[in-house]
Image: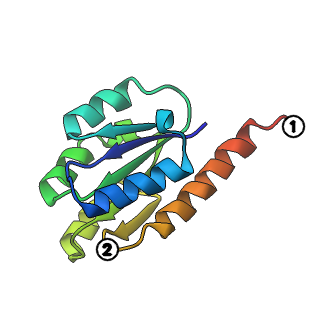
């Protein structure tokens, strides 16, 4: 099963919309809501060997820099990064996390749902008997 660590410190419409998309795609028990980079680090350190996807919504450059320091912990995860600002510096910094997918916060998040579907299919196909 696919587990999602959802990092967002924001309490706004975009967060609520994305939360609904995640809950539509996965059981609630597979979604871990995380508010701080420190909490993300703790969850990544104790993550099981099951497939983990990290969804990051609305982080500023400072938080991106903090997350980049944890890059080793992200090695066995797939990252979906949703940025608020579309400036080149933020996007370039975001790519240092090696995300599987980057989108902007003004989307309807159907693109995120599509990526999650593909990730779930990959996890399921890896667990099918051969």
As drawn, which residue projects farthest toward the right? 130
Q: Quadrant of the N terminus?
A: top right
Q: Looking at the rendering, which quadrant does residue 51 occupy?
A: top right
The location of residue 104, given as percent across then percent down, is 33, 71
Which picture quadrant has residue 117? bottom right
Task: Identify the secondary structure beneath mark 1.
Answer: loop
Total marks placed: 2
Q: Residue at x 32, y 43 (%)?
A: 71
> Measured from the top left, where is residue 43 in percent x and y?
34, 29
Q: Residues within 10 Å of mark 1 (few under 14, many from 20)?
A: few
Q: Are marks 1 and 2 in contact (CB under 8 Å)?
A: no
Q: The C terminus appears in which quarter of the rendering?
A: top right
34 sits to left or right of 60: right
Q: Secondary structure at mark 2?
A: loop
Which sits in the foreground, 1 or 60? 1
Q: Residue at x 45, y 63 (%)?
A: 101
What crowding class fits label 2: few (fewer than 14 Cα within 10 Å), some (14-19), or many (20 or more)? few
- Closest to the observer: 7 or 62? 7
Task: Report the front residue among 74 and 57.
Answer: 57
Residue 118 % position (x, y): 62, 57
Residue displayed at 54% across by 40% down = 27
**Residue matched to label 1:** 130
Quick one: which residue is furthest to the left in this view? 62
Work out whether mark 1 precedes mark 2 in sequence or the reverse, and give the earlier one. 2
Question: Which residue bears the numbered disc 2?
Answer: 106
């Amino acid at each position: 099963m696919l587990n999602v660590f959802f990092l967002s410190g924001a309490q706004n419409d975009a967060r609520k919309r994305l939360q609904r998309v995640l809950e539509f795609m996965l059981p609630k028990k597979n979604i871990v809501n995380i508010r701080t980079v420190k909490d993300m680090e703790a969850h990544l350190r104790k993550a099981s060997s099951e497939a983990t996807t990290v969804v990051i919504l609305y982080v500023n450059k400072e938080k991106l820099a903090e997350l980049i320091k944890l890059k080793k912990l992200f090695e066995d995860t797939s990252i979906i990064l949703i940025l608020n600002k579309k400036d080149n510096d933020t996007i370039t910094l975001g790519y240092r996390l090696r995300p599987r997918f980057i989108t902007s916060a003004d989307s309807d998040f159907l693109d995120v749902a599509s990526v999650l579907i593909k990730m779930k299919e990959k996890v399921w196909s890896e667990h099918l008997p051969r």
